[in-house]
Every structure is written in structure tokens, then in C-alpha cells.
């Protein structure tokens, strides 16, 4: 009996079950076919308990808040890492085109991103010069922001809102009209590279645009470019970047930005 108690205690000491401390990487490893080739019942690792937001779009308990209207402490200028200078009005962050792109101080790998954006009601211009901005995953791969409500603003379809810019056309166009808020919920898997810098697995992205699926686990072809083929350059964790586009139309706004690693 004494031996059994000692053995049981030893097994508990060796057990990998640690409530509330499980990483996403540990879960992903456990989900691999090689980790459970016979599809046996698994009791560890145990997923962390997360308290969801009280309403849709509200950040869950484990989210990293990037902007909630209070300040720009999580952001810096993408060009020189000085303080971010975009304009805050209440809970709204408006692009200041004269100061350039901003990016997060913290670097991320794969994540879930929630971000809301609005085209100003008095928007002017046409095509890519009408409410243009972009959300750059890993600072390199652009998800387009543009006024494309009702397909009235004619432009190339792999440059519409909801597109992986110049790569992947959105499945549908659920954009709201100017003056109303749009929502992106993005699941992003960062690329992996071999030791020699070649691509082991490409980046992938799933996007819900105003609750509607517009990109379904799409493989990203490479870093965004407007004048050459998109290709990969090896990188690790990187900032999230928001674009101050150089077109002459009125600047767009963002709010309620949070991320889960």
C-alpha cells in the first residue's frame, strides 16, 4: 500500500498536466498525428480557461489590448520607432498620413486579430485612392482596407477590402458603407523557414469580414509588393503594422484592436 502511494505521488509529479499554463504550441504539438497515432483518448495538455468578452468583439481575458481609446503606448512609428503620432478622439484612432505607418512595439508570430475600421462619411476619390489603408501581418503581408461598399468603387478585385493584397480575391463583399464600422477577425499563421532561408510552410490567413468568411485558410505567396512578384524573406516574430496610405482621400479610422497569441 505504501509503495502504491509513493508510486502514485511520483506519477503526479511527473505528469505534464498544469492547469492554466498550457501554451498554444503545446496544444498544437499534442494535436499532431504523430503525437497520437492511434487516436487514443488524451487527458493532457489541458486547455487554459479563457473568459470571453461579454459582447461580440469585446476582448477576451487573454487578449493583448493594442488600442482601446486610451493611448498609443503599444505603438510606434514604423519608420524610426519614435512615438506613434496618429490622432485619438474618444475610442477612435484616425490615420495621420503626414506621419507615416505605425507598428506595434511588441513582435508576434501567429495570432488571432480583431480590428475595426471605418471609411469617413465624406470620402472622395476612386479606385485605390478612396479610403485606402492596410493591415500588414508580420509587418509584411497586407490585408487591404478600402471603400468597396456595394462594389460601387471600381478597382482590381484582388485589391478590394478583404483581399490579401494583389494575391487573393475575397470570396464575397460584405463591406459596410462609408460612415459605418467594419470588422475584421483574422486568424493568422506565420510562415516557417528552413535553416537555409527557404520556405518550409507559407503563411496562412483566414478572415471574417463583418462576420462573413472572405478568406479561408489561404496560403500567402510572399511579402506584399506593388511592382514585383511577392516572395518570402526569412523572418521571425514581427510587429503588426497599420498603413498610412499616400492617396489624397480623407484618412480612415480604427478602433478596438486586440490580439491573441
Image (cartoon, helix red, strand yellow):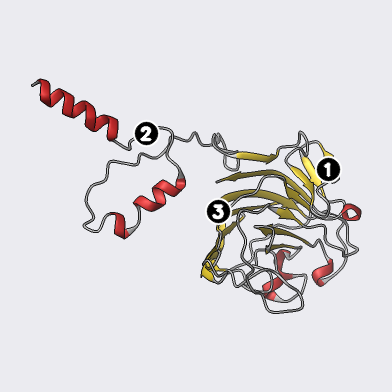
Q: Contact, CB < 8 Å: mark 2 with mark 1?
A: no
Q: Tags 3 and 1 in contact by the CB under 8 Å rule?
A: no
Residue pictured at 43% horizontal, 37% vertical: 48
Q: Nearer the viewer, residue 238 or 100?
A: 238
Q: Nearer the viewer, residue 222 or 15?
A: 15
Assign the N terminus to one quadrant of the image.
Answer: top left
Q: Is residue 98 left or right of residue 170?
A: right
Q: Which residue is the site of mark 3?
A: 110
Q: Relative to residue 200, is residue 10 drawn left or right?
A: left
Q: Spatial distance from mark 3 to mark 1, Cα to Cα?
A: 25 Å
- Residue under circle 1? 83
Between disc 3 and disc 2, whose residue precedes? 2
Extreme residue toward the top, this view: 2
The residue tagged 2 is 18
Return the x and y of residue 246 as percentages of the image width and height. 87, 63
SS class, disc 3 = loop
Other residues around mark 3 within 10 Å, as few (<14) / some (14–19) / many (≥20): many
Specify the quadrant of the image occupied by residue 193.
bottom right
Q: CA distance from mark 3 to mark 2?
A: 23 Å
Q: Residues within 10 Å of mark 1 (few under 14, many from 20)?
A: some
Tell me the CA gap for discs 2 and 1: 39 Å
Q: Residue 59 location, x and y as percent?
A: 59, 38
Of the residues under marks 2 and 1, which one precedes in the sequence? Answer: 2
Q: Does label 3 or label 1 sit earlier along the sequence?
A: 1
* Residue 165 position (above or below residue 54): below
Residue 87 picture quarter:
top right
Mark 2 burial class by Cα count in 10 Å: few <14, some 14-19, many 20+: few
Residue 103 in picture, x, y percent from top left: 74, 50
Element assignment for label 2: loop
* Image spot of residue 149 (x, y percent): 72, 63
Tell me if residue 240 comes above or below residue 142 in the rendering: above
Tell me the residue at 55%/36% (across/down).
53
Amino acid at each position: 500500500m505504501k509503495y502504491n502511494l509513493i508510486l502514485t505521488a511520483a506519477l503526479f509529479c511527473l505528469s505534464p498536466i498544469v492547469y492554466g499554463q498550457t501554451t498554444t504550441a503545446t496544444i498544437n504539438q499534442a494535436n499532431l498525428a504523430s503525437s497520437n497515432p492511434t487516436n487514443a483518448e488524451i487527458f493532457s495538455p489541458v486547455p487554459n480557461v479563457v473568459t470571453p468578452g461579454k459582447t461580440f468583439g469585446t476582448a477576451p481575458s487573454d487578449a493583448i489590448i493594442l488600442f482601446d481609446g486610451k493611448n498609443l503606448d503599444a505603438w510606434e512609428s514604423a519608420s524610426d520607432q519614435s512615438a506613434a503620432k496618429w490622432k485619438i478622439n474618444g475610442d477612435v484612432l484616425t490615420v495621420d498620413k503626414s506621419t507615416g505607418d505605425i507598428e506595434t512595439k511588441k513582435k508576434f508570430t501567429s495570432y488571432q486579430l480583431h480590428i475595426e475600421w471605418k471609411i469617413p462619411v465624406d470620402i472622395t476619390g476612386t479606385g485605390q485612392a478612396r479610403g485606402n489603408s492596410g493591415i500588414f501581418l508580420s509587418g509584411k503581408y497586407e490585408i487591404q482596407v478600402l471603400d468597396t461598399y456595394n462594389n460601387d468603387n471600381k478597382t482590381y478585385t484582388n485589391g478590394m477590402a478583404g483581399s490579401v493584397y494583389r494575391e487573393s480575391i475575397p470570396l464575397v463583399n460584405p463591406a459596410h458603407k462609408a460612415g459605418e464600422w467594419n470588422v475584421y477577425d483574422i486568424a493568422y499563421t506565420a510562415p516557417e523557414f528552413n535553416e537555409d532561408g527557404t520556405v518550409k510552410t507559407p503563411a496562412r490567413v483566414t478572415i471574417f469580414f463583418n462576420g462573413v468568411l472572405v478568406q479561408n485558410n489561404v496560403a500567402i505567396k510572399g511579402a506584399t509588393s506593388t511592382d514585383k512578384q511577392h516572395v518570402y524573406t526569412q523572418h521571425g516574430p514581427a510587429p503588426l503594422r497599420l498603413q498610412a496610405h499616400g492617396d489624397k482621400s480623407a484618412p480612415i479610422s480604427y478602433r478596438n484592436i486586440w490580439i491573441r497569441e
